[in-house]
């Protein structure tokens, strides 16, 4: 069996760590100022105003209203591994008549789960995703 020289193994470990492990999660507090600059109104990170699920997310929750009045709630989970559980929580909490349409109003990017009142326009979605900050 062929062995890596110790220096080559060390370089490989450092390269892999730089590629995958260094990504900081998005947070509500880092993202909120961008939402305000992007024209969203009523931007809040107050746990009592963002809803139960987002309010208890490990990196906070955010709620904002787009120029068209579409309300966005963002739950910032611990990491990408926690996203599926948060999405399940939103589906379970949604009224039964809305559950089949959750894929129209909910999506995730990194550790952020975005839930809209109605399907967002492409511009709304692009603006929101560009405001997710670490």
Image (spheres, rainbow, N blue to C red):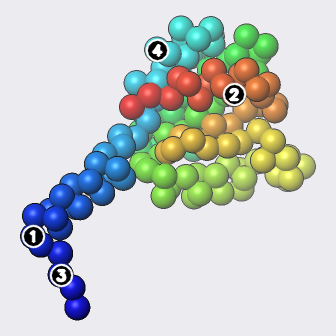
Q: For mark 1, what is the residue? A: 6
Q: What is the CA distance from the residue labelled 4 to the residue labelled 2? A: 17 Å
Q: Secondary structure at mark 1?
A: helix
**Residue lying at the far right of the rendered structure:** 97
> Between tags 4 and 1, which lies in front?
1
The answer to whether marks 2 and 3 mark residues whose Cβ atoms lie closer than 8 Å is: no
* Residue drawn where x is 44% and y is 28% of the image: 133
Q: For mark 2, what is the residue? A: 125
Q: Secondary structure at mark 3?
A: loop
> Between tags 3 and 4, which lies in front?
3
Residue 65 x %, y %? 68, 17
* Residue drawn where x is 58% and y is 34% of the image: 74
> Between tags 2 and 3, which lies in front?
3
Q: Residues within 10 Å of mark 4 (few under 14, many from 20)?
A: some
Q: What is the CA distance from the residue labelled 4 to the residue labelled 1? A: 46 Å
Q: Is residue 13 above or below residue 66?
A: below
Residue 77 x %, y %? 47, 46
The answer to whether marks 4 and 2 mark residues whose Cβ atoms lie closer than 8 Å is: no
Of 133 and 43, which appears nearest the observer? Answer: 133
């Amino acid at each position: 069996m062929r062995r890596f020289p110790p220096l080559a193994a060390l370089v490989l470990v450092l390269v892999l760590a730089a590629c995958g492990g260094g990504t900081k999660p998005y947070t509500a507090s880092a993202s909120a100022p961008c939402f305000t600059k992007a024209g969203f109104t009523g931007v809040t990170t107050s746990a009592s105003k963002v809803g139960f699920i987002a309010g208890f997310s490990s990196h906070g929750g955010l709620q904002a209203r787009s120029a068209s009045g579409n309300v966005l709630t963002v739950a910032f989970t611990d990491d990408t591994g926690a996203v599926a559980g948060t999405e399940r929580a939103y589906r379970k909490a949604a009224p039964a008549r809305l559950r089949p349409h959750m894929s129209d109003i909910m999506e995730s990017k990194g550790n952020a789960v975005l839930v809209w009142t109605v399907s967002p326009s492409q511009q709304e979605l692009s603006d929101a995703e560009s405001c997710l900050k670490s």
